[in-house]
Amino acid sequence: MIKSLRGMNDILSEDYERFTYFINIATDVAQKYGFHFIETPLLEETALFKRSVGESSDIVGKEMYQFTDKGENDVCLRPEGTAGVVRAFIEKKLDKAGGIHRFFYHGSMFRYERPQKGRLRQFHQFGVESFGVDSVYEDATMIMMSADILKRCGIGYRLQLNSLGDSNCMPQYRDSLISYIESVEDEICEDCVRRKTTNPIRVLDCKNEKCQALYEKAPKLINSLCDSCESDFTKLKKILDDNEIAYEIDTNLVRGLDYYSKTAFEFVSDNIGSQSAIAGGGRYDKLVEFLDGRPTPAVGFAMGIERLMELIVMPENKRDGYYIGAMDEESIDLVISLAQRKRQTDKVIIDYKAKNFKNHIKGADKANTKYFILIGSNEIESGTITIKNLEDKTEQTLNMKDF
RNA sequence: GUGGGAUUAGCUCAGUUGGUUAGAGCACUGGUUUGUGGUGCCGGGGGUCGCGGGUUCGAAUCCCGUAUCCCACCCCA
């Protein structure tokens, strides 16, 4: 038997119900905030991710499905959604057009990792990207939008917040952090020694307890922000306070992708195991420029749909539609015709076999229909049908033509 | 990529120190005097015990390998 590849799942039945339930809510929220759908290719040139996500990141460094296609192009399956949207934004010359452009998307992402609960090799993200707004109000709006989606899905969360600084204050901070790391270099783990040169900020994120203890005394970026970053961060906190969005400041929150600056946030859940990040995002003002576009401020976030699906509280399944059953062989053709007509406007479940009352009502119950109709010699003679409401148990008899 | 635990029917799981033809519940299917309420009762189908080797008179059971899932690390959404 041929099985699906490791870390690749089929989505059907109840999972699919949850999947579409989420997509519908997220789409509705995004549209209420004025965002427009964008679809970008699953396959992109590898260089796009190397330049945006960053070669020092694990995503690009070891998790990409990368190969050479028949035209000798170095391509890969997208590991995340932002890079493709930014590429499209620039390619369509929207950077030169100016103004504000807001997009949302959802689709498959691919990362060659060891699968675990909440971590698949092909997984789905819902994300939004906003271009052309440098105001911190947009950052706050992103967070409120994520919170709205989670709230409407009945999902509890903790929001973690940090500021990563910008090109004014980050380099200075980076230098001071490097000197601090050098001062404790003998005591930190191997990974951190490596991070010192590849991406020093990431050491703050190290899960090693010994390292964490040492970094307690490390300089904090939050204390080294320049005036602009500082006032934006203060403003962001105020907006969230005003709108009753609870948050925690996590000075060690470092996004795994290199392109973030200033606002960084992550929504985590305590109910789905170790893969607890359910949404994450932040500002990336330099990315458009970095991918050869005209400098354009931008901010966005993405949500992990499979992780959210574990947490979504689904509404009760309501009875819906009609079940029509035939009492005898002669009535089956009529059942088919009635169903065909009614299906233009309603859900109709039928059984192709003649059965007795008890078996049909079992079928109606299984199909969870609201109405129940039996067709037999009585109906054919009288030209009427009796519709039973299975919820309140009332009946109504109609002329068959009026059904 | 590292360490640990699992894998038996469609699903959830039993299965004794290695010993006849591998079980249960749910699900599926048929019947239960062929026209009014589901639950009851009686039957039926369905398993190469993840896969491949090995030990043994004999393996679901012991050993080795491998695959997948789960947990932790790591990483991230």
Image: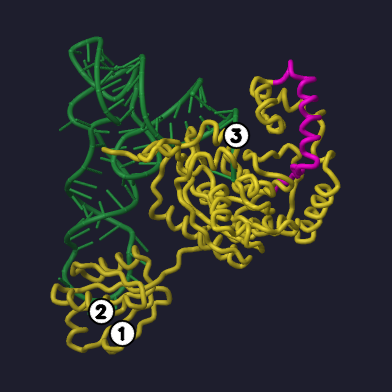
Residue that mark 3 sits on: A57
The image position of residue A279, as x and y in percent, is 61, 48
**Amino acid of disc 2:** Leu
The image position of residue A28, as x and y in percent, is 56, 65
Subunit ID for the residue under disc 2:
A
Disc 1, disc 2: CB below 8 Å?
yes
> In front: A163, or A173?
A173
Alpha carbon separation for disc pair 3 and 2: 60 Å
> In front: A23, or A106?
A106
> In front: A302, or B67?
A302
- The image quadrant of residue A401 is bottom left
The picture's colour for chain B is: green
**Amino acid of disc 1:** Phe
Q: Which mark is residue A338?
A: 2
Residue that mark 1 sits on: A403
Disc 1, disc 3: CB below 8 Å?
no
Point out the stretch of residues depicted in magenta: A159-188
Disc 3, disc 2: CB below 8 Å?
no
Question: Which one is earlier in the sequence, the residue at label 3 or at label 2?
Answer: 3
- The image quadrant of residue A65 is top left
Please tell me whether mark 2 sits on a helix, a strand or a loop.
helix
**Amino acid of disc 3:** Ser
